[in-house]
C-alpha cells in the first residue's frame, strides 16, 4: 500500500477518532449542563419554599387566671370578742341578796346602824371587784383583737404574695415551654431544609464539575487530534536533500518507478531507507535553512530507519 494511501487512512482515522471523542465529550458536557441547570432550578424552589422566620413568643396564653386568691377565707377569731358579764352580774346579785338578808337580820335584832353601814361598804367593795374583773377582760379582749388583726393581715399579705408569685411562675413556665417548642420545631425544620439545600448544592457542584471535566476532555480530544495530524504531517515530511547524506546506495525502485536508496545522514551513523529530494521535485519543499525536504505522503516510498 502506498504511503499516500496510508497517510490518508491514518489521517482519516485521527480525524474520525477526534470527531467521535469530541462529540461524546460534547454530549457529556451538555448533559451535565442540563442536569446542573435543572438542579439549580430545584435549589431555587427549595430556597423559595423555606419556612418563614417565626416569633416563638407570639400567641402565648396566660394561665394565671386559674390561680384562686384564698385570702378571703382568713378571719380574725377575736374580732367580735365580747366580755362575759353573766358571772359578774350573778356575783353582784348574790352580794345584794346577802346584804338585804343581813339588814333584815339587823332590823329584827335591833342592831345599830353602824353594822348596816359596814355591811353596805362591804357590798360596795365587792361590786368594785366585779367591775375591775370586767375591765380586765375588756383589756385582754382588746389585746387579743389587735393580735388577731395583725395575724389576719399577715395571712392576707402572704396569700396575696403567693397568688402573684404563682401567676408569674405559671406564666413564665408557659411562655418558656411554648417558646421552646416553637424554637425546636423551627430549628428541626430548618435543619432538614438546610440538609436538603446542601445536598442539592452538592449535586449542582458535581454536575458543574462534570460539565467542566467534559469540556476539558473535549478540548483535549480536539487538541490531541490536531497534534496527531500535525505529527502525521511532520513524520511524513523529512529532510531528503542529497547534500545531507553519505554512503548513498540504491537498493530498488517503487511501483511508480521512484528510486529507493539506503543512506546515512552526515552526522549520524544510523541507516535509513528513502529517496533523494532532487529526484521527486513534485513531492519536495524547501526548508528555511535552504535544504530540500520530501513529503513522503505524496509518494509510494516509505521512509524508515533500517
Image (tube, helix red, strand yellow):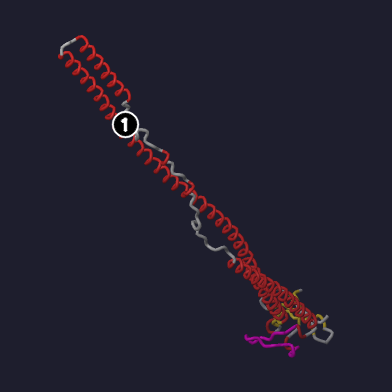
Q: Give coordinates of residue 72: x percent, y percent.
A: 41, 41
Residue beneath label 1, please? 144
Q: Give coordinates of residue 158: x percent, y percent.
A: 38, 40
The answer to whether residue 262 is visible is: no
Residue at image point 61% right, 68% down: 45
Q: Give coordinates of residue 129: x percent, y percent.
A: 24, 21
Whether 202 is drawn above or below 160: the answer is below
Q: Give coordinates of residue 249: x percent, y percent.
A: 77, 80
Towards the viewer: 186 or 292 = 186
For residue 160, side relative to residue 244 (left or right): left
Residue 285 on the magenta segment: yes
Quarter of the image with the N terminus is: bottom right
Pick out the residue farthest to the bottom: 282
Whether 233 is drawn above or below 190: the answer is below
Residues in magenta, as a range:
280-296
Residue at image point 71% right, 74% down: 27
Amino acid at each position: 500500500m502506498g504511503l499516500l494511501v496510508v497517510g490518508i487512512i491514518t489521517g482519516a482515522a485521527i480525524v474520525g477518532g477526534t470527531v467521535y471523542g469530541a462529540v461524546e465529550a460534547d454530549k457529556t458536557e451538555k448533559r451535565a449542563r442540563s442536569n446542573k441547570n435543572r438542579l439549580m432550578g430545584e435549589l431555587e424552589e427549595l430556597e423559595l419554599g423555606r419556612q418563614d422566620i417565626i416569633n416563638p413568643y407570639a400567641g402565648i396564653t396566660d394561665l394565671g387566671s386559674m390561680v384562686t386568691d384564698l385570702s378571703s377565707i382568713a378571719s380574725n377569731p377575736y374580732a367580735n370578742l365580747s366580755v362575759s358579764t353573766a358571772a359578774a352580774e350573778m356575783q353582784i346579785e348574790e352580794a345584794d341578796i346577802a346584804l338585804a338578808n343581813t339588814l333584815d337580820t339587823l332590823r329584827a335584832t335591833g342592831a345599830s346602824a353602824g353594822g348596816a353601814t359596814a355591811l353596805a361598804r362591804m357590798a360596795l367593795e365587792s361590786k368594785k371587784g366585779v367591775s375591775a374583773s370586767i375591765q380586765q377582760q375588756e383589756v385582754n379582749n382588746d389585746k387579743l383583737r389587735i393580735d388577731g388583726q395583725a395575724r389576719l393581715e399577715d395571712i392576707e399579705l402572704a396569700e396575696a404574695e403567693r397568688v402573684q408569685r404563682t401567676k408569674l411562675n405559671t406564666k413564665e413556665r408557659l411562655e418558656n415551654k411554648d417558646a421552646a417548642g416553637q424554637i425546636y420545631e423551627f430549628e428541626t425544620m430548618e435543619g432538614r431544609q438546610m440538609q436538603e439545600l446542601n445536598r442539592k448544592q452538592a449535586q449542582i457542584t458535581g454536575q458543574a464539575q462534570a460539565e467542566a471535566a467534559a469540556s476539558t476532555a473535549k478540548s483535549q480530544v480536539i487538541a490531541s487530534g490536531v497534534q496527531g495530524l500535525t505529527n502525521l504531517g511532520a513524520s511524513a515530511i523529512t529532510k531528503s536533500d542529497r547534500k545531507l547524506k553519505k554512503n548513498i546506495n540504491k537498493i530498488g525502485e517503487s511501483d511508480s518507478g521512484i528510486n529507493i536508496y539506503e543512506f546515512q545522514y552526515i552526522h549520524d551513523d544510523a541507516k535509513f531507507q528513502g529517496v533523494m529530494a532532487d529526484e521527486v521535485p513534485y513531492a519536495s519543499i524547501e526548508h528555511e535553512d535552504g535544504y530540500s525536504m520530501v513529503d513522503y505522503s505524496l509518494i509510494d516510498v516509505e521512509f524508515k530507519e533500517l
